[in-house]
Image: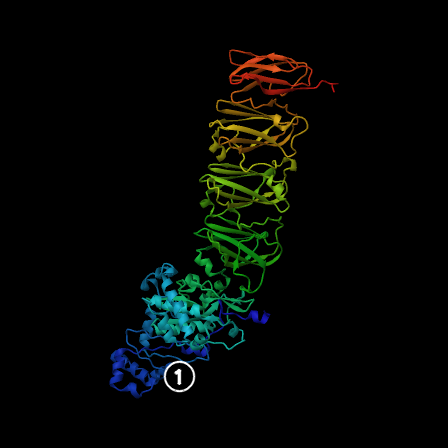
Amino acid sequence: MSTKVAIQKFSFPFSCAARLSQHDEATQPGCVQLKASGLRDLRENRILGDASPVAIIETVVQNEKRAQGGPEPPPGGVTAAARLLVGAGASQKLSVEGEDQRPVAKRQLSSESAARTVTAVKKSAVRKEGEEHGPPKPKERAPPLAAAGKRRRRKDLFTNSEVFNRVDSHVVRAGAELKEKCVYDVKTIVQSVTHGARNELERLRAIWSWLCQNIEYDVGGYLGRSEKLTSPEEVIAAGRGVCCGYSSLCSEMCREVGIECQEVPGHSKGVGYLQGQSLENVQSDHLWNAVLLGGQWFLLDACWGAGRVDVQRESFVKRFDDFYFLTDPEEFVESHFPDEERWQLLEAPIPLEEFERRVFKTSTFFTMGLRLIQPHHFHIVTDDGEANVSLGFSRTATFTFEITQHQDFLHCGAAEQKESGGSSPSGLLTVSRRAMKLRLLPPASGVYDVKLFARPEAATTPLMWVCSFTVECPTPRAMEEIPENPFLSWGLRPAAAALGVAGSSQGSEAAEAEEGVFRLALKTSRPLMALCQLVHPALPAAVAKRCLATQIQPDALSCHVLCPARGFYRLSVFVRDYEKTDDKFQNAGNFLLRCGGKVVAPEELYPPDLGSACGPGTRTLEAGLSKFSHATALVSTQRGECNVTFHNQRDLELHAVLGREEGDPPGAPLARQLFSTYTDSKVTVSVRLPDAGVYRLGLYAKVAPGGDFSPMCDFVLRNSCERPGAPFPAVYSAWRKGCVLFEPRAGLLEARAWVRFRVRVPGARRVSVVGETGTELKLNKSRVWEGEVFSGNGPRPLKLAAALEEAGDMAVLLTFDIKQLEGDV
């Protein structure tokens, strides 16, 4: 689109080029009503039959003056006024109506259609009617509330647009039939579309709906590629028109059903509007309507309600926008500024300069119930490279934004919709339960356009443009790269509460990961399952997975995060109800982390096979495992050993596994670094770590008889002790519940040494240690088998065996290795 064309103002959906000529503006307001009593006098004196309109008006005014006992008008005064009223148009028409009907003066704004319909009234009656029902005089405010009562708002007329479903449906059907029959007569169309309307409001709605549904904006005519259509007949026949075509046709149709309607000229923030441009002494570019309902004026714009102009394609896009039907003045003035202050219909009208500086808000802004907190003017200058925008809302919503290099035109062809996509690295958008905050961080010096988009939280439709700003950045702030956020905002999402997340330890601002470590705690209102995702611009997915350890409890979720690189991270949390295994995980929150100091070394990351549930939680409670000695998932030891104890209330068969990234170290396998003891309902898992590092301790249980072992939870064991821990003896299946090894606890014994054995084996008839020789243990008063055993020369291991009551043979319980002597091969 050429620069010349772009500078012109499209009237659709946000502007119009038509304006009253000076001649029209001077002559239009005159209107005189002929009362019934004057009509009888005229009939009796036979004036109507052969007198001119000037003589009629002069006679009526003089008769009224005499009846009131007032002075007669000066010679020629009435005649001059009467000639002014009837001589302005190319044609003259006198309409005489009863007192029960309110005549309307029709103003046609185009030079092609200059005809006037003039209704005669007394001057005193004009003044009285203007004081009671008409808009205020220029330079005056709207009628005082004390006289007219509290101003009614749109919601006082109808609760929502659904009340017009019947009317709108009828208008669509009637409009299609009229178009098929090629009916272009205004009166016939009005009678058809308003058929069945039960009151004045429904008749007006039918007219406005028909205009929006059947008249398209005449883009070609406005650009000069075709003849511009403005008169009602031309507009109806062609089905297109510019803004004055909409407004004049609306006035004409309202007149047919007795609704008083005015055309209102003024400025609009539509296509072609230059942000920051001074409109002082600039010819207005748009026309809309004001209607009188129940003694009060309301505003509407069928041009903006019908659709919008696609600037790039130079075409009209139909889009029924109900917002511009009887819009409240406080919202209408955000985009429409009338030439006459009185048509703002505000108690405190705003000046033109304020209109120019205000933030532009689309109809979606108001229909979603959004509220601007800051800034109040569209142009923002950054402070230390940062600017802030915030909106309030009453219903949960999803937001995103777009920041681009500045273009002069507010409507420059950019999309008014935005699909859910990644956030921009030039800003941080956070959403709380009642507000949206946007920290803008322009990447370089310059001027930028910022568009905010929103939609109701539960909606799946594209996000809609709601408002716009201009940001000037003299000096940008040096920033690290921020990871993309496909979920649009930072912090807990507004819908998190509905998903079961009731609170968070971290707000929407960026959190600092001290020493490269961070912990997120979420409070939940019901048991949930959770998955976490960590993203860093330079971090591979496989490495990022080893940076997370998640603990899931019935009333809380915890995520332990490690940061192996400096910069910003995105931590996203996904949840679903714990018992609803078929449900999909949904995003509950996205948190921005920053690591600016010490980072975690690669060998300090969590083991790669760490499970989704770490530490005791919902899963262990459900299985009957309780009273854990370690309540968190992370266990640190400086001695290289620890005991994890818990209660097994359901007497489940258990299994423990120890692992690390490198696998088994040289020497004893990691399985020998674990030893489990189960007495009554208490289980003790003893761990001796072979060297410093990070290990995974996994607990498994058979929750169903005959089933497989299922994961219960994982513990992360972090050992800082360099001294290797001695392995435990090897365990065999005969070692079962109730068996307790008191000594020796080491699984590797010195050669040629006497070793004291003490062990409890419930139900055993005989217990012995077998090596190079066999040694029988004796049962003491405490039901403990004990004795001294010679370890031998090795390498033959010692076997601890028992003859159990149910079996006559000796079963191996444990085996102990013997160290090799120096010099032995």
Instruction: Give percent across and percent down for residue 183.
Output: 40, 76
Q: Nearer the viewer, residue 699 or 485?
A: 699
Percent x, y of residue 361: 48, 60
Residue tagged 1: 91
Q: What kind of element bears circle 1?
A: loop
Instruction: Examine the rendering and report whether any part of residue 82 can be seen.
Output: yes
Residue 446 in the image: state x and y as whole percent: 61, 58
Q: Residues within 10 Å of mark 1 (few under 14, many from 20)?
A: few
Closer to us: 206 or 326: 206
Q: How are the residues colored?
A: rainbow
State the residue at coordinates (37%, 81%): 85
Instruction: Indicate the quadrant containing the C terminus: top left, top right, bottom left or bottom right.
Output: top right
**Residue that sits furthest to the bottom in the current view:** 50
**Amino acid at pointer 1:** Ser
Q: Quadrant of residue 237?
A: bottom left
Where is residue 532, by image quadrant?
Answer: top right
The reply, left or right, for residue 609 in relation to residue 820 is left
Considering only vertical position in the picture, is 466 above or below 714?
below
Quarter of the image containing the N terminus?
bottom right
Residue 33: % across, % down: 32, 77
